[in-house]
Image (tube, grey):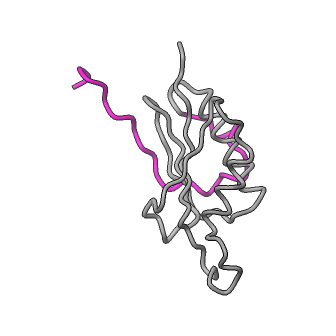
Amino acid sequence: MTISPTWITLCDTCKRPGWAEGDMAETDGTRLAALVEARVPPGGAVRTRRVSCTMGCERACNVIVQGAGRIGYSLGTFEPTEAAAEAIAAYAALHAESETGRVPFRDWPQGVKGHFVSRHLPVPEPGDE
């Protein structure tokens, strides 16, 4: 069975508290997106895309990990750091290996623990009613 790619959707407009006091050349979301993208080889089992606003502003920086026919997850409150990017990419790789999208808690990278906001069940396939 071929599993469709896992997508990391990265909010590139996220701004963490204190953003305005720092270097405002880029948003925190843009910084995190670039760090995650640098860890995901093109054309592999994990892909990335940027969107402007995932509507989770209270929990910036936000990402969504999802794949067709599998459970997806919204995660938030990430800082735009190398460690956060590594944890997000590592979790997405585990999601990509799962037929259901479930990754056992014991396998979660430490850097994603405490960042889960919500779980999204797959949309039913035609005829599943």
Q: Say if the magenta span includes residue 110.
A: yes
Q: Which residues are magenta?
A: 102-129
Res. 102 image quadrant: top right
Residue beneath the point at 50% across and 46% down: 73
Quadrant, the C terminus: top left
Closer-to-camera residue (90/38):
38
- Measuring from the top left, give residue 79's x and y in whole percent: 68, 65
Closer-to-camera residue (84/49):
49
Secondary structure mostly seen in the magenta stretch: loop
Drawn side of residue 77 relative to residue 109, left or right: left
State the residue lying farthest toward the front: 25
Residue beneath the point at 45% across and 46% down: 119
From the viewer's perspective, is residue 122 above or below residue 115?
Answer: above
State the residue lying farthest toward the top: 1
- Measuring from the top left, give residue 26's x and y in whole percent: 65, 71
From the viewer's perspective, is residue 70 above or below residue 76?
Answer: above
Residue beneath the point at 66% across and 41% down: 91
From the viewer's perspective, is residue 4 above or below residue 22?
Answer: above
- Measuring from the top left, give residue 106's x and y in whole percent: 69, 39
Q: Say if the magenta span includes residue 38.
A: no
State the residue lying farthest toward the right: 82
Drawn side of residue 116 relative to residue 126, left or right: right
Residue beneath the point at 75% across and 49% down: 86
